[in-house]
Structure formats: C-alpha cells, structure tokens
Amino acid sequence: MEFPPRPELFEFHGVPMTHYFTDLWERVQNFKARPDDILIATYPKAGTTWVSYILDLLYFGQTSPERLTSIPIYDRVPFLELGHPSFYSGVDLAENLPTSPRIIKTHLPVQFIPKSFWEQNCKIVYLGRNAKDNVVSYFHFGRMDMIEPDPGDWNSYLKRFMEGKVVFGSWYDHVNGWWKKKQTYSNLHYMFYEEMTENCAKELDKLCSFLGLSPSLEEKKQIINEVQFDNMKNNDMVNFSTSPRMNFKILHFMRKGKVGDWKNHFTVAQNEEFDEDYKRKMKDPTLHFRTEICDWNVAYK
Ligand code: A3P
C-alpha cells in the first residue's frame, strides 16, 4: 500500500509534535470527559497497548467477549489526540464509544490533558518505562510507523531523544510531570513497565484495587495468560497488524517486549553520556526507573 509522506516535527506550545496530534487540537481540548471514563496515559512505547488490553479485558472480557475478536484494540481504546481531518479522529471514536466505562488512551504530557478529565475526577492510569528501553523501542517504532518522522540513524536519534526533540517531547519531562501530578491528584495510578514484566499478577492486583474491581482468580489467570507477550503478538486484534499506518515489512509492532534490550543498542560511550545526562535531568529521588530486572529463570539455571 501507499504510505503518506512522513510528517515534520514542529514546536507546539513548547513541545515537539507533528500535525497528526495537533490538527484537531480544539476538539481534543474541549473533549467532554465523563466521571467513569478511564484515561491511560503514557509516553509513546511505554507499553500502552499492554495496559490498554488489560483494562479492556478487566471491564469487557467477560461481558462482551465478541468485542475482543472483532474490533481492533485501537478502536476499542481510542487514541484521543490522534487525528487527521480527512481520515481519523480519536475524539470521534471516543465520543461514539458505546461502552461504559470508556477507556481512552493518550500520550499527552500532563499539562495538555483536556481539563474535563480533571474536573470529572476521572481515573487515570499512567505507565512509565525506563528511558533506555523506551528510546530503543521508540526508534524502532519510528522505522515502521509511517506517521512518525523519519528516525534517521540510531546515534542521531538517541541524541534527539536526550534533547527531547521527538514527538510528544522530552521523556524526562513526561515521566516527571505525571509523577508530580500524582502528589496532588489522587485518582492517578502510576505503574512501571519493569514491574509489569517482573510480576504481572502483582501489578494486576494493584491495578484492580485502584479501579475498585475484584475479578475472580480464574478471570485474573485468564487475563495474565491473554496479555503475555507471545499471545498478544499472535493476536491480530491487539498486535496492530490491521493498522494501515504501520509497515510490518520493516518490523513487527510487538517487537521484543523485554527489559534490558537497550544493551543490544547502546555503545559504551553512548551509555556513559546518557547516564551523565540522565543524572542531570532526573533529580527527584522518589522517581526511580530500573533498566534491568533479574530473570529468575536464568539466574537459577
Ligand atoms: P518493544 O519495542 O521494546 O518490543 P506501546 O504499546 O506504548 O506502543 O509500547 C510498545 C512496546 O511495548 C513494545 O516494546 C512492545 O513489544 C511492548 N509490549 C506490548 N505488549 C507487551 C507485553 N504483553 N509484554 C511485554 N511487552 C509488551
């Protein structure tokens, strides 16, 4: 198929964006949230689809299983700010969602969230991922997602990521901005990709407690099984293989799903420079990301 030309990055209210995320700005900003809406907020490539699928299964896995096999995840969980006047509007999709609650996804930094979400005191789930794996995943995504600016080569991409010159801006500002918000907005649950990888069941329990849900043990087991990387990779309703904007000839959307893959990309020099810069930008000792986790299966071999 023909893919449209890659969009350009430009500064938008202080944050680098592309027109795909600003074309419908007024409509996004005026979006009318409902009190039971649930917003999933992430920096791109933090595992948004993973947590979206978990929430979708929690709310609708038992009551409307037909949704799971007939509607792609990007239509079940609309991407609020994604929009193009002539072909797609996340706002339209969200407004027309027949479900209650409506589960909506966003990559917006906290200062851009439409005010009705705060006014309605909506539940918000934030998922963060360590910067090193996040940048690797974002780089590869840029190669295959035709509505991303061309990522160029890895070294220059890494530099631009550190400078915050990628779509949705600085990772550092994003994760810190949302972390800070948690101090004043209690309906915000902040999760970490690494903890999900390490112990999905524990994170599912914490998530359910935040949402006020109490699924049976059987349901939880089913969900944990459904959302395993390989199962999601083989599930066309969640793996984006039906999305016209992605070029699967280049790469699969469900790429590796690992903590620590950055080690296969960073040179020693890049890693040192990244760490130095990271220390300067990440001053809050209460916000801690892990760049590796112990794989117990390997550790005890
Ligand atoms: P990788 O590129 O490192 O493989 P998003 O949904 O925010 O675009 O994030 C996509 C990233 O999350 C990809 O990372 C993808 O493989 C990973 N991911 C998606 N589902 C996952 C799962 N069930 N377990 C682990 N990682 C998952």
Image: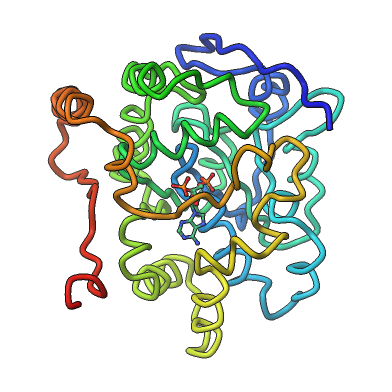
Q: Is residue 245 above or below residue 270?
A: below
Q: Observer-nearest residue: 228 or 266?
A: 266
Q: Is residue 25 above or below residue 193?
A: above
- Residue 61, image x, y percentages: 67, 75
Q: Tell me the quadrant of the picture where the N terminus can be found.
A: top right
Q: Quadrant of residue 277?
A: top left
Q: Is residue 50 above or below residue 67?
A: above
Q: Is residue 37 above or below residue 265?
A: below
Q: Observer-nearest residue: 51 or 190?
A: 51
Q: Quadrant of residue 99?
A: bottom right
- Residue 237, image x, y percentages: 72, 60
Q: Residue at x 49, y 18 (%)?
A: 152
Q: Residue at x 37, y 62 (%)?
A: 196
Total numbered labels? 0
- Residue 253, image x, y percentages: 59, 47
Q: Is residue 281 visible?
A: no
Q: Is residue 118 visible?
A: yes
- Residue 79, image x, y percentages: 65, 41
Q: Tell me the quadrant of the picture where the C terminus can be found.
A: bottom left
